Amino acid sequence: MSVKLLYFAWVREKTGLGEETVDLPGDVKTITDLIDWLKARGPEFVSAFEQSDVIRTAIDQTHVPHDAAIANAREIAFFPPVTGG
């Protein structure tokens, strides 16, 4: 399955990527599976997803929990919580 991944804020800074299109292995079924697969790609992804519990995710521009299925997703976005002042 081919899917576009978008990375925002410090996730983008740590991965060095704003976006990429990847072919996911068949055993990647949920956001959690995807994060685990990304971490296996290298130290930049380990660093970016070190605090994966605070990273928000959207599938096709709809916020989803990490246990959400990614079947038929066209776009998956990762972004840390927004802070402001």
Image (cartoon, rainbow, N blue to C red):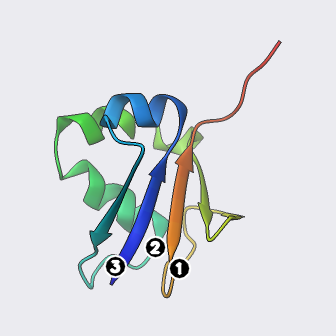
Looking at marks 3 and 1 on the same chain, the residue that comes earlier in the sequence is marked by: 3
Horizontal and vertical percent for residue 69? 53, 79
Report the residue marked by disc 2: 30
Q: Amino acid at mark 2?
A: Thr
Is the C terminus in the top left, top right, bottom left or bottom right quadrant?
top right
Is the N terminus in the top left, top right, bottom left or bottom right quadrant?
bottom left
Task: Give the crowd class for mark 1: few <14, some 14-19, many >=20 residues within 10 Å.
Answer: some
Q: Amino acid at mark 1?
A: Ala
Image check: 38 left or right of 30?
A: left
Q: Residue at x 28, y 81 (%)?
A: 27
Indicate the secondary structure of the residue bearing disc 2: loop
Q: Residue at x 16, y 43 (%)?
A: 42
Report the residue marked by disc 3: 2
Say which quarter of the image contains residue 84: top right
Image check: 37 left or right of 13?
A: left
Horizontal and vertical percent for residue 70? 49, 78
Indicate the secondary structure of the residue bearing disc 1: loop
Q: Check if mark 1's residue and mark 2's residue have beta carbons within 8 Å.
A: yes
Cα distance between the residues tagged 3 and 1: 15 Å
Indicate the secondary structure of the residue bearing disc 3: strand
Cα distance between the residues tagged 2 and 3: 14 Å
- Outermost residue toward the top in this view: 85
Say which quarter of the image contains residue 68: bottom right
Report the residue marked by disc 1: 69
Q: Depth check: give the residue in front, 12 or 46.
A: 12
In the drawing, what numbered circle is on residue 42? Answer: none
Q: Residue at x 50, y 87 (%)?
A: 72
Image check: 39 left or right of 3?
A: left
Horizontal and vertical percent for residue 80? 59, 37
Task: Give the crowd class for mark 3: few <14, some 14-19, many >=20 residues within 10 Å.
Answer: few
Q: Depth check: give the residue in front, 66 or 20.
A: 20
